[in-house]
């Protein structure tokens, strides 16, 4: 019992580390069977089910009569597999299309949520695909955005990791007005140029100070040169309320 319990913990730890990405099909089935077979080694049964079904999907679709012919299969296994299948179908039918943020107002609302409650100077990157579906959000710097300590490679790494084609920077001004100073404009242009080299458009850089939001693009046109064209957001809403 102690050895068996330890094995189940190792399987759970492996799943928590990387999900099912490192699991063979029989190992996935073995882990699922933990819920239906609480006190026995599920590995032999998992192998048998894969052999009978021909694959993981085939094993999960085995009819009740086929499962009844396997001596080690518990009586409740057909019900368990039916529950898994029905729950999967219901979940798949309820998947909603990902939200798109293809307008300035939508980008601003998302950015405002991102910096809600932030009381100091911070900069966040929002990464998007071609249709402006949000792929990832990460804090890329704590402090004044134009500081020389802000490493452009961190922004590029985040964009590449998210497989983004567009990015929006969002900065907070804790003790300053919501207006980009010349250093921030220069830093934004530099970031746009470097991102452009790896196929990512810096669509905008939004600066928040309290309830006021300013777009660097709208305020200065800093990101609209030939090297890093701004993304075409579909409305013309101004950057300040």
Image (cartoon, rainbow, N blue to C red):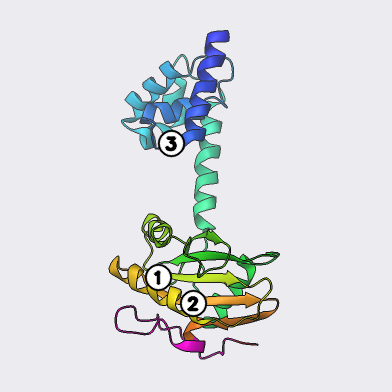
Residue lying at 53% horizontally and 20% vertically, measured from the top left: 8
Is 228 within the magenta?
Answer: yes
Q: Earlier in the sequence, mark 3 or mark 1?
A: 3
Is most of the magenta stretch helix, strand or loop? loop
Residue 3, percent across and down? 53, 9
Residue 3 sits above or below residue 106 on the image: above
Q: Is residue 7 among the parts visible in the rendering?
A: yes
Front residue of this view, candidates 12 and 192: 192
> In the rendered image, which quarter is residue 229 located in?
bottom left
Which residue is tagged 1? Answer: 191
Q: Residue at x 58, y 15 (%)?
A: 39
Q: Secondary structure at mark 2?
A: helix
Distance in Å between CA atoms under marks 3 and 1: 37 Å
Mark 1 residue crowding within 10 angstroms, few (<14) / some (14–19) / many (20+): many
Q: Secondary structure at mark 3?
A: loop
Sequence-wise, the earlier of marks 2 and 3 is 3
Which residues, given as a range, are shown in magenta?
A: 218-239
Q: Which residue is mark 2?
A: 183
Residue 65 visible in the picture: no
**Placement of the N terminus among the 4 image quadrants:** top right
Task: Tell me the CA gap for discs 1 and 2.
Answer: 12 Å
Q: How far across and down, in percent of the image, does residue 24 sit?
A: 36, 30
Mark 3, residue position: 20
């Amino acid at each position: 019992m102690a050895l068996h319990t330890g094995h189940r913990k190792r399987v759970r730890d492996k799943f928590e580390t990387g999900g099912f990405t490192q699991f063979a099909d029989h190992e996935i089935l073995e882990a699922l069977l933990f819920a239906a077979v609480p006190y026995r080694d599920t590995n032999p049964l998992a192998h048998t089910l894969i052999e009978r079904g021909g694959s993981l999907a085939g094993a999960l679709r085995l009819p009740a009569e086929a499962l009844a012919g396997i001596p080690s299969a518990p009586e409740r296994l057909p019900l368990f597999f039916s529950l898994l299948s029905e729950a999967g179908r219901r979940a798949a039918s309820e998947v909603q299309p990902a939200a798109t943020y293809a307008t300035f107002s939508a980008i601003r609302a998302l950015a405002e949520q991102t910096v809600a409650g932030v009381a100091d100077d911070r900069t966040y990157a929002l990464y998007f695909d071609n249709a402006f579906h949000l792929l990832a959000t990460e804090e890329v710097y704590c402090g004044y955005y134009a500081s020389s300590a802000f490493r452009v490679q961190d922004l590029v790494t985040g964009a590449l990791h998210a497989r983004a084609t567009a990015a929006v920077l969002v900065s907070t001004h804790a003790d300053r007005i919501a207006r980009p100073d010349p250093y921030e404009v220069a830093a934004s242009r530099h970031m746009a140029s470097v991102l452009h080299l790896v196929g990512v458009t810096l669509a905008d850089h939004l600066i928040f100070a309290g309830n006021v939001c300013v777009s660097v693009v709208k305020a200065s046109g800093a990101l609209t040169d030939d090297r890093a064209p701004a993304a075409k957001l579909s409305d013309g809403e101004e950057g300040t309320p």
